[in-house]
Image (spheres, helix red, strand yellow):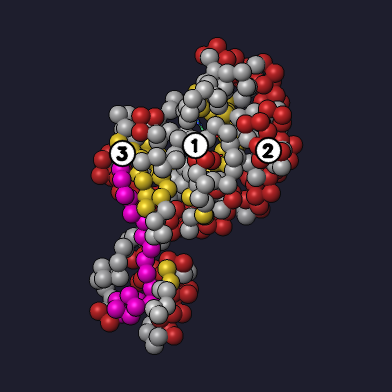
Amino acid sequence: METKKKDIRAFTKEQLRDFFVSHGDKAFRGNQVYEWLWHKSAHSFEGMTNLSKETRQMLESNFTINHIKVDQMQRSSDGTIKNAVLLHDDLVVESVLIPTKSRTTACVSSQVGCSLDCRFCATARLKRMRNLNPDEIYDQVVAIDNESRLYFDRPLTNIVFMGMGEPLMNYNNVLQAIDKITSPEGLGMSPKRITLSTSGVPKMIKKMADDGVKFKLAVSLHSAIDSVRTTIMPFNATFNLSDLREALKYWYNKTKSRITYEYVVWEGINDKLRDVEALVDFCRFAPSKVNLIEYNPIDEGDFRQASNKAIDLYVDTLERHGIVVTVRRSRGKDIDAACGQLANKS
Ligand code: SAH
């Protein structure tokens, strides 16, 4: 029986150097291969043209490169592009390119499906679940960077971890991917242009602060009242608001980095003055920004976007308390590429 070849991108540069030394070659060969794998995003050993034929064949018989494949690309009338990404084990995740006048943002997935159970999110309904590997996250970014250059004539400028999955439930792999994305040996992007969005896992938010990460943090809050939040995001029964707030305080004290809250206002759920006041109170401990996101319906009826009047109530009240607030329009709705719509429909 043929033994299963290992995915070469699970190896560090050091390990690749050691591999070559143990095969009677120079450690430097490891650096060359590492550069091909990450900086040059090589899809095959054959294409590593500065290696001898024997070396390439030796690699071929020991390793595989489990590259992702953009299986299907859809373009929205507003320019947004959605990729259906095929993984080596035939599972699929989605990632999105969002162009504006001045930026191109990649919205990437961190898991296949999601382990959380937000009632308003299509991804939560996908049963099958596994964590994405660092290279599978990195590859999504490279694919979108290429599309940005091809269709918009400019490189990718920003990355948000707002695709499928909860990044803090796949913390190590997400961090390794971000290391590669920000390293000059990878894409060399500034961590300030990367935002990790989380439903709020208190323990992991503290860990991130301890790890001294340099990217930005966004929290999907949607309600600052426990009973309401637990109804729409049931895991809030375990990770409740007071633990979340304490973790965010810890984050702010360590990083001094402003916290962004993502927030959808729904009719009859969180559209009253008491909801806004709870939000103002929740935000008080640190400089905050609230992004009011438009609801993208995922089925018939259960949730409905609140009226403009309710949105105005939020904007006016938050501004009066010195909290930065933006109202974000959805992008890519016609191809199910907007927030919470990623569910491998096609
Ligand atoms: N698990 C992470 C990242 C993925 S969700 C998180 O929860 O932050 C990305 C954002 O889309 C979150 O703010 C989420 O609350 C929001 N979202 C989910 N479903 C949505 C929907 N149907 N309409 C609008 N936003 C939605």
Looking at the picture, how far across and down is residue 54, in whole percent? 28, 82
Residue pictured at 71% horizontal, 31% vertical: 226
Q: In this view, does 279 lie above or below 164?
A: above
Q: How many labels does the image show?
A: 3
Residue pictured at 65% horizontal, 50% vertical: 204
Label 3 is placed on what type of residue?
A: Gln
Q: Distance between the residues labelled 2 and 1?
A: 18 Å
Does the Cβ of the disc 1 residue fall within 8 Å of ligand 1?
A: yes
- Disc number for residue 236: 2
Looking at the picture, how far across and down is residue 297, in whole percent? 47, 27
> In front of the other: label 2 or label 1?
1
Does the magenta portion include 324? Answer: no
Label 2 is placed on what type of residue?
A: Asn
Looking at the picture, how far across and down is residue 187, in whole percent? 39, 54
Secondary structure, mark 3, is strand
Q: In which quarter of the image is the C terminus?
A: top left
298 left or right of 242?
A: left
Q: In this view, does 248 lie above or below 128?
A: above
Secondary structure, mark 2, is helix
Q: Nearer the viewer, residue 209 or 266?
A: 266
Secondary structure, mark 1, is loop
Q: Distance between the residues labelled 2 and 3?
A: 34 Å
Stretch of the chain drawn in magenta: 55-73
In the picture of the structure, the residue carrying the numbered disc 3 is 74
207 left or right of 193?
A: right
Sequence-wise first label, 2 or 1: 1
Identify the residue at the far bottom of this view.
24
Label 1 is placed on what type of residue?
A: Ala
Sequence-wise first label, 3 or 1: 3
